[in-house]
Amino acid sequence: MRKPTVSEPYPVRALTLWQPHASAVAVLGKDIENRGWPPSSFSGGLILVHAGLDTDQAALRQVPRDLELPRGAVVAIARITGAHTDCDGRCSPWADRDSTWHWELSDAVQLPTPVTEVKGRQRLWVPDDPLRRRVAAALPQNAACLASHLRKEPSASTAALPAAPETVIRPARSSACPSTPTK
């Protein structure tokens, strides 16, 4: 039996990453997130990049020593643009050859000041409205379209968004707001 499709006009999820992976998405252009499971039907959607409390000690050797590593905080917003399993780690310097799934990330926007005191969760999780508003307030001024999306306000780039498709796809970008899911 298939799960019912939930229609959300402003779909946003959050993903908790160990440091330094969260900061690498925010600052260093990390474009692949290695996971053992597919992103389900959420491809094309916005994610809040949450830095968890744990640290991947081996990965610390691969990033600059002065990279800030906030913990328990949302550090960026990004977009899941697809996922694949067939590249043997050649798709990106960030890809782990042993990972089952490589989630493709794009359009990352770093929060100038991380939103702190945020408890993470496993897998993709739904951020509550107060957290969405805090992240919207922390976005840089040139990301007003993202802020309105997080506050669930209709705009030219976010009005009447359909439910996410049930397969992993590579959606076109919205020219009005590059990090907003396309219609």
Image: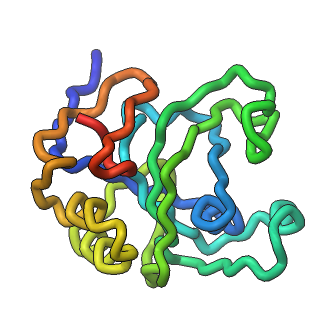
Q: Where 82 sits versus 113, above or below?
A: above
| Residue 96 position in % (x across, y down) | 78, 40
The structure residue drawn at horizontal position 73% and vertical position 77%, both measured from the top left corner, is: 67
**Nearer-the-camera pick, 150 or 127:** 150
In the picture, residue 70 is in which quadrant? bottom right
In the picture, residue 87 is in which quadrant? top right
Q: Where 3 sits versus 96, above or below?
A: above
Image quadrant occupied by the N terminus: top left
| Residue 13 position in % (x across, y down) | 37, 52
Looking at the rendered structure, the number of numbered marks drawn on it comes to 0
**Nearer-the-camera pick, 103 or 175:** 175
Give the side of residue 66 with respect to residue 1, left or right.
right
Image quadrant occupied by the C terminus: top left
Q: How is the image coloured?
A: rainbow
Give the side of residue 59 with respect to residue 38, left or right.
right
The structure residue drawn at horizontal position 32% and vertical position 55%, both measured from the top left corner, is: 126
| Residue 169 position in % (x across, y down) | 43, 24
Give the side of residue 129 with respect to residue 115, left or right.
left
Q: Where 94 sits versus 71, above or below?
A: above
Q: Residue furthest top?
A: 1
Give the side of residue 166 with respect to residue 85, left or right.
left
The structure residue drawn at horizontal position 22% and vertical position 68%, both measured from the top left corner, is: 129
The structure residue drawn at horizontal position 83% and vertical position 78%, both measured from the top left corner, is: 65
Q: Where 66 sits versus 36, above or below?
A: below
